[in-house]
């Protein structure tokens, strides 16, 4: 279900309670779902507010750690946009509540929700551009004297370290946010169910001749755009989904697969069925370092800067600069300011400015080859 008007209803309810109007029936205080939704929408409004904390104060404890972090995130998002020359015209969000659970004593609650946030901005004398993100939130609430308050918000947004740094957060706080990203980037072995089945292509044995396959950059970028804020139902979805998303884009652009077992080649096999429950795939399809290792020199080549990339190419991210590569995004074009933009999963991003990291982040730029002879 989608909750779009709870903030105004909730504020009205609180105002009525404060006034103690005797001539109208008492309005019940908003429940945990309404409070969580109002809080999430207040996070959005805080980005363009002169005083971000004031937007959040109704739903959080102003002196608490959560309020401090979210004030910094909102302020940092606005400051980062300004430093890029992006003048924000509007920030809006749509919250879809996924579930709500109340504690046994009905004094605590947990609400899960997916928030789509759209930022519309323009550069000087330029047309407007739009960036969109999709983030899952788990909001923890506690009831105090009959009123629900947000006491925790667990979510993963790859942009948070850069927002915190832009807002002047301490290095320790920024590093903590980066470590959360790095933990998520580590693919757990349990992500692969059952035994890894070898997939072998025998097409070359039947043809007896070579094919020249050209990379379709438009198709790769188009697939990324289509599924940036959703998930292709034809593929398995992972919690750390960025490499899987990049592989899907590359395959949509006709990058050729290579047979092997789980630890070799680059391939995805649907096992002849529509459901994804029995799909098999190589580690290089779903894992960032393995994907980089397999593609380099076979499917793509490193270039020295982002200027060497175009639609359908890839940017890799080492969040903390420790040599462990954590993330990948698909280049899908440029914004109205002429800056390269990317789509990505894990945190879902559509047409985001490509430099998603903070000051310690390292980047590698993979230019996909124009064609392959197989």
Image: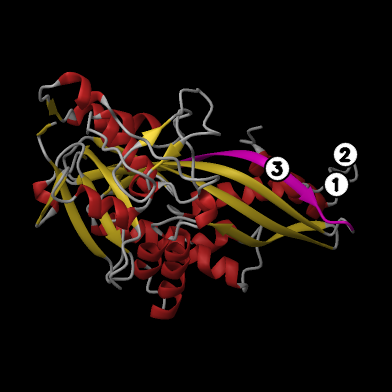
- How would you classify the magenta stretch by its main secondary structure? strand
Q: Nearer the viewer, mark 2 or mark 3?
A: 3
Residue picked out by circle 2: 24
**Helix, strand or loop for disc 1:** loop
- Where's the C terminus, which quadrant? top left
Residue 343, position as x, y percentages in the image: 32, 42
Q: Earlier in the sequence, mark 3 or mark 1?
A: 1
| Magenta stretch bounds | 92-104
Binning the other alpha carbons within 10 Å of mark 2 as few (below 14), some (14 to 19) or many (20 upward) gives few
The residue at the point 44 percent across, 30 percent down is 232
The residue at the point 24 percent across, 44 percent down is 341
Contact flag, marks 3 and 1 (Cβ < 8 Å)? no
Q: Between residues 265 and 2, which one lies in front from this camera angle?
A: 265
Q: Is residue 350 visible?
A: no
Residue picked out by circle 3: 99
| Distance of label 3 from label 1 (alpha carbons) | 34 Å
Q: Is residue 55 visible?
A: yes
| Distance of label 2 from label 3 (alpha carbons) | 32 Å
In the image, taking residue 142 as reference, residue 294 lies left or right, namely left
Contact flag, marks 2 and 1 (Cβ < 8 Å)? yes
Residue 241, position as x, y percentages in the image: 43, 46
Q: Between residues 152 and 47, which one lies in front from this camera angle?
A: 152
């Amino acid at each position: 279900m989608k909750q779009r008007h709870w903030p105004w209803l909730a504020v009205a309810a609180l105002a009525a309670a404060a006034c103690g109007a005797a001539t109208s029936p008492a309005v019940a205080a908003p429940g945990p779902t309404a409070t969580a939704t109002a809080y999430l929408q207040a996070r959005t409004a805080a980005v363009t507010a002169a005083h971000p904390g004031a937007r959040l104060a109704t739903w959080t404890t102003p002196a608490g750690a959560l309020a401090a972090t979210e004030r910094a995130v909102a302020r940092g998002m606005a400051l980062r946009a300004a430093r890029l020359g992006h003048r924000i015209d509007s920030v809006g969000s749509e919250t879809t509540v996924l579930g709500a659970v109340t504690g046994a004593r009905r004094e605590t609650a947990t609400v899960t929700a997916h928030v789509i946030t759209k930022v519309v901005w323009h550069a000087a004398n330029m047309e407007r551009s739009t960036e969109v993100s999709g983030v899952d939130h788990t909001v923890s609430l506690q009831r105090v004297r009959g009123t629900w308050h947000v006491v925790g918000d667990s979510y993963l947004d790859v942009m948070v370290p850069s927002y915190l740094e832009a807002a002047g957060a301490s290095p320790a706080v920024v590093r903590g946010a980066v470590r959360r990203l790095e933990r998520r980037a580590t693919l757990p072995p349990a992500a692969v169910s059952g035994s890894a089945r070898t997939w072998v292509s025998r097409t070359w044995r039947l043809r007896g001749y070579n094919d020249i396959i050209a990379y379709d950059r438009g198709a790769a970028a188009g697939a990324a755009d289509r599924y940036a804020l959703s998930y292709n139902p034809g593929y398995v979805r992972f919690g750390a989904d960025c490499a899987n998303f990049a592989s899907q884009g590359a395959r949509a652009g006709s990058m050729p697969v290579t047979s092997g077992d789980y630890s070799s080649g680059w391939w995805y096999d649907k096992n002849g069925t529509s459901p994804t429950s029995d799909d098999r795939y190589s580690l290089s399809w779903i894992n960032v370092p393995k994907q980089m290792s397999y593609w380099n020199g076979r499917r793509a080549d490193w270039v020295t800067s982002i200027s060497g990339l175009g639609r359908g190419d890839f940017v890799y991210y080492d969040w903390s600069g420790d040599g462990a590569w954590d993330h990948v995004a698909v280049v899908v074009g440029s914004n109205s300011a002429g800056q390269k933009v990317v789509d990505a999963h894990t945190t879902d991003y559509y047409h985001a400015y490509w430099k998603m990291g903070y000051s310690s982040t390292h980047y590698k730029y993979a230019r996909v080859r124009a064609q392959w002879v197989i």
